[in-house]
């Protein structure tokens, strides 16, 4: 996550106070933390020449001075503002949740309060004693009447150093008590703290405490507890979907080139990567034949990297209310950054960004696309974007320019070796019960025979043929036999037949613009797959043989 060093934030706040900016606005959920920062600035002679008393106001207490004494008859907002206007000592007044008088969410603004704030401007600026008013609220809500008079101060979520300090303190206390066992190396402790980025200090402390009490041991396995806390943030956002994926990289057959590329970038958001001067990877775009494992490998990255996986549905971004679509995109980006390091998955990205030149939506799509491009180009937060696309030709060329994604991979029809691997994964996954297995033996000879017969099948079709074969055995209430798999293959018309022209177009595009997800050694001596158009009539496509028309496999030959 992009975080500003706390000392830098203090310096900016001190400069605004010294310049006597009358009204500042800090959006945060962490009242105690922001009050601590304000007090540290107000009493630091090195930062601010004229130290100030810090007063606070809440509707439940009224104005409370630096000694904790509540001032009578100041609970009403107008009375509080009158008190501030007449105060005769240098001070900073923190108005907590004052935004409720600014309107919004269908409520009318309190125009007397807003008028009073405008009336006070000159008297605060010209006061003999410096006075600053700071609004703090979980929400950013400014009435138009005050937008020119209020300065917004960014207050970021806790930095890695702040979270690490909390974790160290909790570890020290519990080690002293002897009730909790700590099983963490320095790197694992760093990973726990990095995983908690995006949480408030209170949320991080709660997550660490929960991890400790669940089994009396704090270990790297407790990353799951941290991710569960982050899941709450996602659920509340309403834009992103938190994907709990149990798919491992081992469950994905083939695509070894892409797997190696991803493996080399594991842990690249940790401090250990800084020694090499490495930035966090931006993301990867995966295109290719439908059903070749693009979505599956997207889900498996989460388990490999042990990072939260967020799914962005472009349909949820576009809303019927004018201006809300742009706000939804900003909210999605902000949420992804808030819980970084994280993985943002955009499935079938072409459905959201195709036809952006159309004027049918008054330019909404173009503006959202521009937001996304700018963020992808300039983001420094460790949010890894993985986008998948079936129809790559409909994507704007700006999206595929270097600097947006680190690499573009092409997932082609699986080779013989990959088909064997996919068959093995799905057979081992489902052939568990001894009664179902019977005398069937899963060996290399069987895999080779079936892989040859299902040439031209995509990964999804191979999975389905295994399921179809099991249905054959289930219907007859018997054990599985080789013939069941062979019959399922014979009854399947693959995409390489029904979508021949589409596949050829994808390959033509990928041949010069993308890197093959399949490594070179798997593609050697592999000519291609038979491709025929489907018949004009009838339910069955024509049979095809190894002598039919073939086309070359796409993708640049770069291996990782």
Image: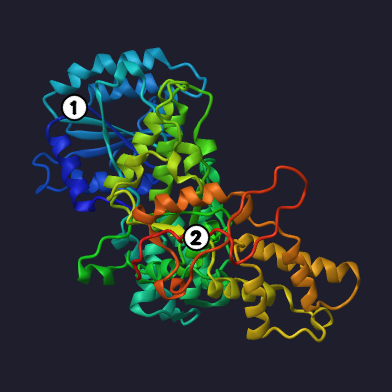
For marks 2 and 1, the one nearer the N-term is 1
User: Marks 2/1: CA distance?
Assistant: 75 Å
Position above or below: 69 against 295: above
Please tell me in which quadrant of the rendered image residue 139 appears: top left
The residue sitting at the front extreme is: 547
Position of residue 76 measured from the top left corner of the image (x, y, whole percent): 42, 23
Position of residue 242 measured from the top left corner of the image (x, y, whole percent): 54, 52
- Residue 412: mark in rendering: 2
- SS type, badge 2: loop
The local crowd at label 1, few if under 14, some if 14 to 19, many if 20 or more residues have their Cα within 10 Å, is few
Position of residue 246 measured from the top left corner of the image (x, y, whole percent): 59, 66
Residue 95 can be seen, yes or no: yes
Image position of 462 (left or right of 199): right
Image position of 116 (left or right of 357): left
Image position of 444 (left or right of 332): right
Residue under numbered circle 1: 88
Q: Are marks 2 and 1 in contact (CB under 8 Å)?
A: no
The local crowd at label 2, few if under 14, some if 14 to 19, many if 20 or more residues have their Cα within 10 Å, is many
Q: Which quarter of the figure is the C terminus placed in?
A: bottom left
Which residue appears at 65% of the width and 85% of the height? 445
Of residues 124 and 296, the one nearer the viewer is: 296
């Amino acid at each position: 996550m992009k975080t500003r060093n706390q000392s830098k934030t203090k310096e900016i706040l001190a400069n605004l106070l010294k310049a006597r900016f009358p009204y500042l606005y800090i959006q945060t959920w962490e009242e105690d933390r922001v009050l601590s920062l304000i007090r540290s600035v107000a009493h630091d002679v090195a930062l601010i020449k004229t130290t100030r008393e810090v007063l606070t106001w809440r509707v439940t207490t009224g104005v409370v001075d630096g000694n904790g004494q509540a001032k009578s008859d100041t609970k009403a907002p107008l009375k509080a503002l009158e008190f501030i206007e007449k105060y005769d000592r240098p001070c900073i007044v923190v108005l907590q949740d004052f935004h409720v008088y600014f309107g919004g969410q269908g409520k009318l603004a309190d125009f007397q309060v807003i008028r009073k704030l405008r009336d006070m401007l000159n008297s605060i600026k010209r006061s003999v004693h410096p006075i600053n008013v700071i609004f703090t609220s979980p929400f950013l809500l400014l009435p138009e009447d005050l937008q020119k008079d209020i300065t917004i101060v960014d207050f970021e979520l806790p930095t890695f150093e702040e979270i690490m300090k909390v974790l160290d303190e909790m570890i020290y206390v519990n080690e002293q008590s002897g009730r909790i066992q700590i099983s963490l190396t320095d790197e694992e402790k760093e990973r726990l703290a990095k995983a908690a980025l995006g949480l408030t200090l209170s949320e991080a402390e709660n997550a660490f405490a929960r991890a400790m009490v669940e089994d009396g041991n704090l270990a790297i396995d407790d990353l799951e507890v941290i991710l569960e806390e982050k899941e709450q943030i996602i659920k509340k956002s309403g834009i992103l979907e938190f994907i709990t994926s149990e798919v491992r990289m081992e469950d994905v057959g083939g695509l070894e080139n892409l797997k190696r590329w991803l493996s080399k970038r594991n842990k690249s958001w940790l401090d250990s990567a800084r020694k090499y001067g490495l930035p966090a990877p931006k993301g990867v775009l995966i295109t290719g034949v439908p059903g070749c494992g693009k979505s599956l490998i997207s889900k498996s990255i989460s388990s490999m990297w042990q990072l939260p996986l967020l799914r962005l549905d472009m349909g949820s971004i576009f809303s019927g209310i004018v201006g809300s679509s742009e706000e939804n995109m900003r909210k999605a980006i902000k949420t992804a950054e808030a819980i970084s390091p994280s993985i943002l998955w955009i499935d079938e990205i072409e459905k959201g960004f195709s036809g952006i030149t159309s004027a049918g939506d008054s330019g909404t799509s173009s503006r959202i696309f521009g937001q996304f491009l700018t963020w992808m180009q300039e983001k420094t937060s460790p949010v890894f974007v993985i986008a998948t696309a079936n129809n790559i030709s409909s994507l704007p060329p700006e999206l595929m320019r270097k600097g947006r994604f680190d690499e573009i991979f092409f997932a082609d029809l699986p080779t013989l070796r990959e088909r064997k691997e996919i068959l093995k994964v799905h057979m081992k996954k489902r052939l568990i019960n001894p009664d179902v297995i019977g005398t069937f033996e899963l060996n290399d000879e069987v895999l080779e025979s079936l892989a040859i017969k299902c040439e031209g099948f995509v990964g999804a079709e191979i999975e389905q043929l295994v399921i179809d074969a099991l249905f054959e055995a289930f219907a007859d209430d018997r054990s599985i036999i080789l013939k069941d798999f062979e019959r399922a293959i014979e009854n399947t018309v693959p995409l390489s037949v029904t979508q021949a022209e589409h596949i050829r177009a994808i390959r033509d595009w990928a041949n010069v613009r993308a890197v093959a997800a399949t490594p070179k050694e798997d593609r050697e001596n592999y000519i291609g797959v038979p491709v025929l158009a489907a018949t004009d009539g009838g339910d069955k496509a024509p049979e095809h043989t190894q002598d039919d028309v073939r086309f070359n496999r796409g993708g640049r030959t770069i291996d990782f």
